[in-house]
Image: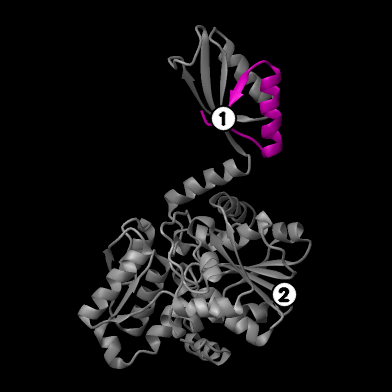
Amino acid sequence: MTLDLVTIEDVERARKLLAGVVRRTPLEPCRQLTAKLSGPAWLKYENVQRAGSYKVRGAYTRIARLSPGERAAGVVAASAGNHAQGVALAAGLLGTSATVFMPVGAPLPKVSATKGYGAEVRLVGTTVDESLLAAQEYARAAGAVFIHPFDHPDVIAGQGTVALEILEQCPDVKTIVTGVGGGGLISGIAVAAKALRPDIRVIGVQAAGAAAYPPSLSAGHPVRLPRFATIADGIAVGTPGELTFAHVSKLVDEIVTVSDEDISRALLMLMERCKTVVEPAGGVGVAALMAGVIKVETPVVAVLSGGNMDPLLILRVLEHGLVAAGRHLRFTVRCVDRPGQLALLLGQIAEQGANVVSVEHQRRDPRLRLGEVEVDLSVETRGSEQSDHLVNALRSAGYTVTFGG
């Protein structure tokens, strides 16, 4: 069956509907990416959109087009967090009730924010796909309207308004890069970009641990992942939608993947250098550009699709990013167990300009010989080059240095 694709006229109508509701988010240059790519690179800050992501664009468009009777029956949604908040906010603005199904492991700040916008939250399932099934079943039983997070023409049209803003803010853009979960955002962006500027390349990025599009595109139809896991919970979707798959397969130029390590490095850079908080799903476009997994023609725009970051996850991601960037080093040193040896070891580390974060002795490991001790160390450095110098200096001094033990 051939599905009708969303048109540029649909996106333009959505924009009129969203006037005065959503923010026209900033487009700012990124010096770090510009230097790496040897050409202009820009960031589209949808992480500062209302409710913290682009999702309110599609959710409001969909709910606003319901009949008075449908709105009176209420709306139902399923989400790991961003769509949940978008639906809750839109429902409140449009005077309808919202029930939102979220995975049991959904970040607490996203759950709290969704409740704060007035929605009833039900935690069901361990993945968004399981929450989707529960939400659809509830909608049928209650006679409410299910608001799909990505696979609906109105949702796609609303998300496409991001591209209209990009084209106005950066008229000479050659490449747009954005994260992909179910595919609603990239579908809408591709519709608008290709209609107004067919020469623009639209590139999607998925987390390697939850990448359903590459096998689906190879098979020619949506393929369900048997399992998936990634820090980018916002794009951890196991199956592309039928409608979004039709858009992506026809309009999107390329889909690539990035590792969780790539994502962590990108979020660290965005926080340190761009002074902005971006959730893992929102930073995958930047991660792909930093990792060099795509060749782009500049000017390039990377969409920061969301900023709803769990503070606890921030701590883990930043530490992960520091490790991935070689700035947080964990290793074990085996040395003789005698007075003054620890002070000597720490002094040699200090001579290399590294900062010791933690130290732990291990004397009872059966692998140790009599008179030996292992010292587990965590140190901060300025980067991988200094880390390499530190390890080489310790080994040159006669210490046995190991990792991951």
> Which of these two is toward me, 230 or 300?
230
Q: Is residue 128 visible?
A: yes
For the residues marked 1 and 2, what is the alpha-carbon distance in whole angstroms? 43 Å
Horizontal and vertical percent for residue 142?
21, 79
Whether residue 8 is situated above or below residue 156 in the rendered picture: below
Horizontal and vertical percent for residue 301?
66, 70
Q: Is residue 115 visible?
A: no
> Where does label 2 land, which residue?
174
Asked whether 141 falls inside the magenta stretch, the response is no
Q: Which residue is painted at 45% across and 81% down in the image?
A: 155
The part of the chain drawn in magenta is 378-405
Q: Which residue is painted at 63% across and 44% down in the image?
A: 325
The amino acid type, in three-letter code, at marker 1 is Phe
Disc 1 to disc 2: CB gap under 8 Å: no
Horizontal side of 353 relative to 111 (left or right) equals right
Q: Which residue is painted at 75% across and 60% down in the image?
A: 37
Judging from the image, the colouring scheme is one colour
Which of the 4 quarters of the picture holds residue 62?
bottom left
Asked whether 386 falls inside the magenta stretch, the response is yes
Q: Which residue is painted at 43% across and 15% down in the image?
A: 364
> Which of the labelled discs sits on residue 114, or is there none?
none
Q: In terms of sequence position, does the residue under pointer 1 or pointer 2 come before the other?
A: 2
> Where does label 1 land, which residue?
403
> Which of these two is toward me, 238 or 75?
238
The amino acid type, in three-letter code, at marker 2 is Lys
Disc tally is: 2
